[in-house]
Amino acid sequence: MNTLNLSTPSPALSRRPGSLAAVLALALTVLAPSQGLLRPPADALLLLAALAALRPASGPGRGALSLGLILAAAVALFLALPTPLQGGDGLRLLAILALAQCSVRLLAEQPDSRWSGPATAGLFGLWLLYVWELGVTVFEVPRVLLPAPSLIVQALWDHAATLGGDFVQTVLKSVLIGYLLGNGLGVLTGIAIDRAPFLQRGLQPVAALTSTVPLVGVAPIAVMWFGFDWPSKAAVIVLMTFFPALINTLAGLEAAGKLERELMHSYAAGYRRTLLWLRLPTALPHIFGALKVNATLSLIGAIVAEFFGSPTAGLGFRISTEAARMNMPLVWAAIVVAALTGSGLYALLSRLERRVNFWHPAFRSR
């Protein structure tokens, strides 16, 4: 006799992720009064997007249709809203925010693939930019307080050559050279301290002291010692990145187990072979952790150091001078360049870590 399995819900009864948000969007759209020429088409798109989000997904085509309708409704609503808000426009805003949450959950619940994570993060970022643009435009926020994303993109386009020169000055000269020197010296000093115990008693306290020196106090001194150009900024970055690289190298070298060391000793392996074939590979996850942290620290250090003296180029110089002129779109454009650079460096190091440490349990399961 066939029995009905009540533990597993049927596809027809399964609730789609974000359906409650879609119901809320549908109710808010119906309650909002229609006024003006552009609001009825925007309301129609909102209704279609909410209905599409309510229907159970039956494949990637249905999901793509739902996402497309939601994005089209968002664009239509942005074009239809007046400044200041009137009538039921607040209900429409709540409806589009509910559909935004529904779209992110819909994309996140798709079958796992190599692009599902980046696509979900990208869609969430687009919604944040949309809400930013919508809020600044509708509520007429002064650009001195917070410029709209469209103005920032326009500043990126209009001042691309200037920002490109700032990128070369700050990133390719100061950050790159200081980052390589600081991390290289930190790793080599860690290996030297591990080799000679008396260096650990002498150098490690001095290295710890360097991590407590405030950046705002070191930057003016570095400018006086090395001049206003990139060497002073590179010196500040070396000081910032040296200690994390040193501490993580020492922790990684100590991570090799006693059993593995005894096995290398039974093979008559000396210190050099044990270091190259056992201890350094074991220390690589710790070293990459320091490299990723220092990637963002070095960029922050270079920008802050440029506040205390710089030639007529650099992201920090651009931020400080344009902020004094109240040219906030260009200030935010320089911040966007710095943020994208830091994120790109971090992503590049993460990908390199995955390639180098493929043997590590943290990466073998991915």
Image (tube, rainbow, N blue to C red):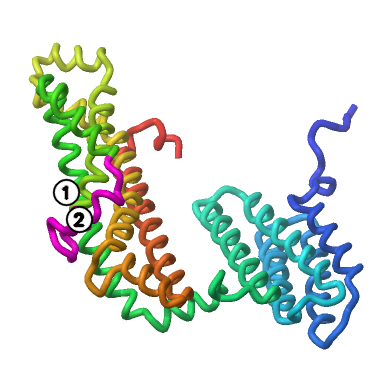
The residue segment tinted magenta is 213-233
Of residues 281 and 137, the one drawn nearer to the viewer in this rendering: 137
Q: Is residue 72 in the magenta section? A: no
Q: x, y (%) of residue 354?
A: 35, 43
The circle drawn on residue 234 is 2
Report the number of numbered marks: 2
Taken as a whole, is the magenta stretch helix, strand or loop? Answer: helix
- The quadrant holding residue 266 is top left
Q: Amino acid at mark 2?
A: Ala
Q: x, y (%) of residue 295?
A: 32, 50
Residue 50 falls left or right of residue 364: right
Q: Residues within 10 Å of mark 1 (few under 14, many from 20)?
A: some
Can residue 101 be seen here? Answer: yes
Q: Does residue 68 lie above or below 359 as drawn? A: below
Q: Does residue 171 lie above or below 321 as drawn? A: above
Badge 2 element: helix
Q: Amino acid at mark 1?
A: Leu
Residue at 39% in and 74% down? 322
Q: Tell me whether the residue at label 2 lies in contact with that at label 1, contact meaning CB atoms closer than 8 angstroms.
A: yes
Residue at 41% in and 62% down? 340
Residue 108 falls left or right of residue 317: right
- Quarter occupied by the N terminus: top right
Residue 322 falls left or right of residue 310: right
**Residue at label 1?**
181
Q: x, y (%) of residue 291?
A: 29, 44
Q: CA distance from mark 2 to mark 1?
A: 9 Å
Badge 1 element: helix
Q: Residues within 10 Å of mark 2 (few under 14, many from 20)?
A: many
Q: x, y (%) of residue 355?
A: 31, 44
Q: Is residue 219 in the magenta section? A: yes
The circle drawn on residue 61 is none
